[in-house]
Image (tube, helix red, strand yellow):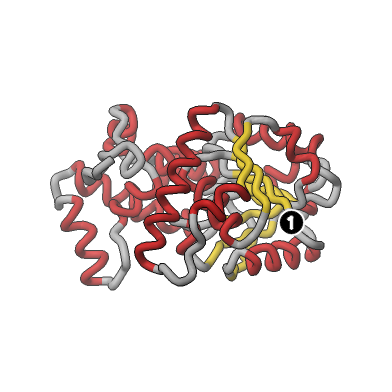
Amino acid sequence: MDIKTVGVIGAGVMGIGVAQNLAQTNHQVILIDIAENILEKAKQNIRNNIRFQGFFNKKNIEKTENVLPKILFTSDYQLLKNADFVVENVVEKWDIKKDVYAQIDVICPEHCIFAANTSAIPITRIGSITKRPAKVIGMHFMNPVPMKKMVETIRGYHTSDETIEIAKKFLSQMGKDCIIINDAPGFVANRLSHLFMNEAANLVMENVATPKDIDDIFKKCYGHAMGPLETADLIGLDTVVDTLQVLYENYQDSKFRCSPLLKRMVDAGLYGQKSGKGFYTYQH
């Protein structure tokens, strides 16, 4: 299957990264979100991201004027009627995701594959609300998407071998490789990483260590590129809280119970990098 037109649903941090990566690898992209101001902000963020990348890789980076025309910014789902592939990146709330898939399942052509870029919601559950469960797959992209070469890719109960092969080809076209795993809430990456982030927040709350000291232990003792609280700020503390909630609901295991500090920070609007302040302060 030749993948030319790709729908990207959700113009948040992940959706922006996926859309940019696709445009830079010569795909036609339809980026969908609910409001014009969100889409306008997404366009500006992509423009800034491309310029930022250009500082590090001036030879290979495409100019902004070559990338942005490949992305159609819209709130009209009907434009997905000719999409070959859709990557969904909406918030980690089941009621919202369920409505999105109900809409696109009717609009998208029969051959179109749905890739859920979800943090924790099972792919089998997402597939069950469509009429094409064999064409539903999980693609857990890492942030920042254009700079991360590996994608955790999840086979749902009904995901076909053909869909797996097309997904591999699709990711290869984006300049990425994948690791295929079986479906389970949180998959591998988030089931493990969110335990680290949650417990790190508890350590801050208990005054055991500062965020910097906790992150330095991970980086300097374990050799990790980032510490758990830096990672939480990058992902967005609101997304971390939502993901922990999904894990707790699915497993009914107290180890996934969200740290009170994380909840309080989200209530205060301290989401991390995207709001300018989380466990650290960022320039906006």
Query: Furthest residue to the right?
Result: 110
In depth, the one of 26 and 125 nearer the eye is: 26
Position of the N terminus, as image quadrant, is bottom right
Residue at the spot x=81%, y=35% of the render?
A: 106
Position of the C terminus, as image quadrant, is top left
In depth, the one of 181 and 17 nearer the eye is: 17
Mark 1 Cα-neighbour bin, 10 Å: few <14, some 14–19, many ≥20: some
Q: Quadrant of residue 226?
A: bottom left
Q: Position of residue 241 (x, y in %)?
A: 40, 39
Q: Is residue 2 left or right of residue 206?
A: right
Residue at the spot x=25%, y=67% of the render?
A: 219
- Whether residue 254 is visible, yes or no, is no
Residue at the spot x=45%, y=48% of the render?
A: 47
- Whether residue 43 is visible, yes or no, is yes
Q: Position of residue 209 (x, y in %)?
A: 15, 52
User: Where 83 falls versus 214 (above or below)?
Assistant: above
Label count reads: 1
In depth, the one of 204 and 141 nearer the eye is: 141
Q: Which residue is mark 1?
A: 4
Q: Quadrant of residue 282?
A: top left
Query: Furthest residue to the front?
Result: 65
Q: Position of residue 135 (x, y in %)?
A: 77, 53
User: Where 221 falls versus 271 (above or below)?
Assistant: below
Q: Position of residue 265 (x, y in %)?
A: 28, 34
User: Which amino acid is tagged 1?
Assistant: Lys
Residue at the spot x=63%, y=30% of the render?
A: 75
**Label 1 residue SS:** loop
Q: Is residue 8 left or right of residue 166?
A: left
Q: Quadrant of residue 207?
A: top left
